[in-house]
Image (tube, rainbow, N blue to C red):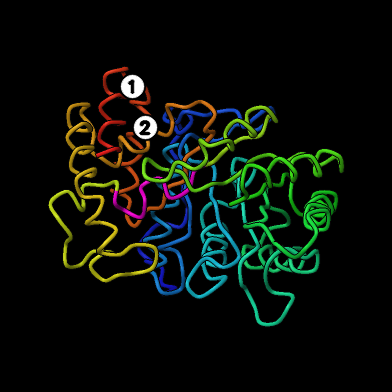
Amino acid sequence: MKIFDKTNPIDYRPSEDRYNQMLFRRCGKSGIQLPAISLGLWHNFGFVDNLENGRNIVKRAFDLGITHFDLANNYGPPFGSAEENFGTILKRDLAKYRDELFISSKAGYDMWPGPYGNFGSRKYLIASLDQSLKRMGLDYVDLFYHHRPDPDTPLEETMGALDQIVRSGKALYVGISNYSADETSKAIKVLRDLGTPCLIHQAKYSMFERWVEDGLLDVLDNSGVGLIAFSPLAQGMLTDKYVNGIPKDSRAAKNMTYLDKVTVEQNLPKIKALSDIAKSRGQKLSQMALSWLLKDDRVTSVLIGASSVGQLEENLQSIKSVDFSSDETKKIESALLS
């Protein structure tokens, strides 16, 4: 739904104290610092969504010190539409602030028909980035990821494509996503040998999804590579939405992608217990879930989505309470085992 409110002034001026409102963290051993909270455009920014709402979310995010905006070639729906809408917002509101922004995109999942529109071949990755740049109206992205491992393409070809992309000037940095600890270790070595170090790994990480603690965090820390966590709220389970059951209009009630009624019901005891702990900390459950990830300084940034400005503002309060007492930590771990 590509509609702008014509009464909304075009001459956007960001808040002058935006950098005083955000916590920034160094990404591994690089020169890059990322905001503790980054904004992902996986949902709510496709052609099916209201572009004016997306525009307001992006502008407010920048006002609050969010400089990192994360996309992928297949975000929408339909595929590519989130990048195109973001390009429209950039042109309209943020073009003059391009050098203050850190924009990422990815390729690795199904994008177009045939053998060259998926996974990790050099042809797919380079062609996909070219398309992404056109959709966003950019000369380069700050970061380009391989979105998932390819079991059939040699790792050297995939990492070689990332190296070529940086040398061509189409991306300043490269990263990987959804790689296991062992795969990550190998990819980091190949990239280092090529002379294009891996900047960051984007992994699914939340109170309910802790696989990165079984080796991946150590690999990244020892290699000087950052970590950015996606799905930190477990598709909404780590919010107050399900504390009193499953609302009829919720994602779980509709058995939508990535979340179903059975999963929520199985986790309800944990959700309720965690919500009580959050209240004792003066937080909402969603805020505590984000703070809990940020308590580990190996986590460079946490990637959130937002369907409204209010939701964005609420979740950004999490950066004010990233410390946990030993008693709070014990209670959280106990709740997660319930």
Q: Extreme front residue here?
A: 337
Q: Quadrant of residue 181?
A: top right
Q: Identity of the amino acid at label 2? A: Ser
In the image, what residue occupies the spot 26% across and 47% down?
239
Answer whether labels 2 and 1 touch (C-beta < 8 Å). Answer: yes
Residue 139 in percent (x, y) is at: 73, 57
Q: Residues within 10 Å of mark 1 (few under 14, many from 20)?
A: some
Span highlighted in magenta in the image: 229-237
Quickly name the residue at label 1: 324
Q: Quadrant of residue 215?
A: top right
> Label 2 vs label 1: CA separation?
9 Å
Q: Identity of the amino acid at label 1? A: Phe
In the image, what residue occupies the spot 56% across and 35% down?
34
Residue 199 in percent (x, y) is at: 68, 39
In the image, what residue occupies the spot 85% across and 49% down?
167
Residue 131 in percent (x, y) is at: 69, 69
**Judging from the image, what secondary structure is the residue with disc 1 in?**
loop
Pick whichever of labels 2 and 1 is earlier in the sequence.
2
Quadrant of image for the N terminus: bottom left
